[in-house]
């Protein structure tokens, strides 16, 4: 079992929300990374990202309550994990995401993007990063996907990427409305609509 002190809320009040390299969201609580299992309104249920790994199959869970764009920790127990926390893993993930996103908006060569980002990364994190050739391949794939998504042949082919339709907390804020041959994209969240409904003008 993990050696971290048992706690229902960890050492923080709020979980750190991190977008994964696949565009989905993870949360970091005291060095443990979780992926979303399900949610009921503003209550989110998370499972350890290692649950699907044959080596660990960690079944630890956490619960958060979404407040605006943040996730307040409701239930968390470090001793549920059968492995130690990895403080560097969230930083590695954020660095990989940064390189991938730069690759989508920059015309620089993947090798230059990789070298520039690594140069600004702390020495403690650099040894934990994937190999440079693996990162360059990720950047190239991200560019191909981005080009395909941003250059549809017809209006029906256009699909809004998750990066532009889901918040960092995994909340959908793009509504696709179709009437006959007309198509409307509405950008808002259920929470914003509620505020608008209750507003007094």
Image: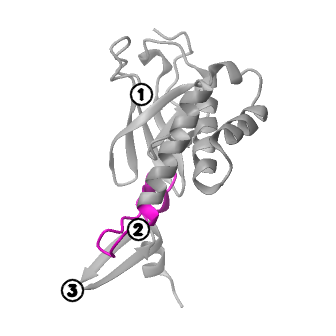
Image height check: is 77 above or below 69?
above
> Residue at point 44% right, 45% down?
24
Residue at the spot of label 1 = 49
Residue at 62 percent across and 56 percent down: it is 105
Instruction: Sort mark 2 into few (<14), some (14-19) or many (20+) by Cα contacts within 10 Å.
Output: some
The span from disc 3 to disc 2 (Cα, nearest Å) is 19 Å
| Pointer 3 local density, CA inside 10 Å: few below 14, some 14–19, many at least 20 | few
* Label placed on residue 174: 2
Q: Which mark is residue 180?
A: 3
Considering only order in the chain, which callout, 2 or 3, is on the residue closer to the N terminus?
Answer: 2
- Residue 48, horizontal then vertical, whole percent: 41, 27
- Is residue 166 shown to the viewer in this render? no
Answer with left or right where residue 180 lies relative to residue 131.
left
In percent of width and height, residue 194 lies at 42, 73
Q: Residue furthest left?
A: 180
* Magenta-drawn segment: 149-173
Seen at 44% across and 17% down, the residue is: 81
Q: Quadrant of the C terminus?
A: bottom right
- Say if mark 2 contacts mark 1, CB within 8 Å: no
Q: Are marks 1 and 3 in contact (CB under 8 Å)?
A: no
Q: Secondary structure at mark 2?
A: strand
Circle 1 packing at 10 Å, graded few (<14), some (14-19), many (20+), is some
């Amino acid at each position: 079992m993990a050696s971290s002190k048992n706690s229902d809320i960890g050492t923080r009040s709020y979980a750190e929300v991190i977008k994964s390299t696949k565009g989905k969201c993870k949360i970091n609580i005291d060095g443990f990374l979780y992926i979303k299992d399900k949610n009921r309104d503003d209550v989110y249920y998370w499972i350890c990202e290692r649950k699907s790994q044959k080596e660990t199959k960690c079944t630890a869970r956490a619960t958060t309550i979404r407040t605006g764009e943040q996730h307040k920790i409701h239930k968390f127990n470090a001793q549920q994990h059968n492995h130690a926390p990895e403080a560097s893993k969230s930083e590695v993930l954020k660095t990989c995401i940064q390189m991938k996103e730069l690759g989508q908006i920059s015309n620089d060569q993947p090798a230059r993007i990789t070298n520039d980002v690594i140069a600004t990364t702390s020495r403690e994190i650099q040894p934990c990063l994937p190999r440079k050739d693996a990162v360059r391949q990720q950047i190239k794939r991200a560019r191909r996907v981005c080009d395909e998504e941003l250059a549809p042949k017809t209006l029906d082919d256009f699909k809004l990427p998750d990066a532009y339709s889901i918040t960092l907390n995994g909340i959908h804020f793009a509504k696709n409305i179709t009437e006959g041959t007309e198509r409307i994209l509405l950008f808002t969240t259920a929470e914003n609509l509620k505020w608008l409904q209750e507003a007094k003008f």
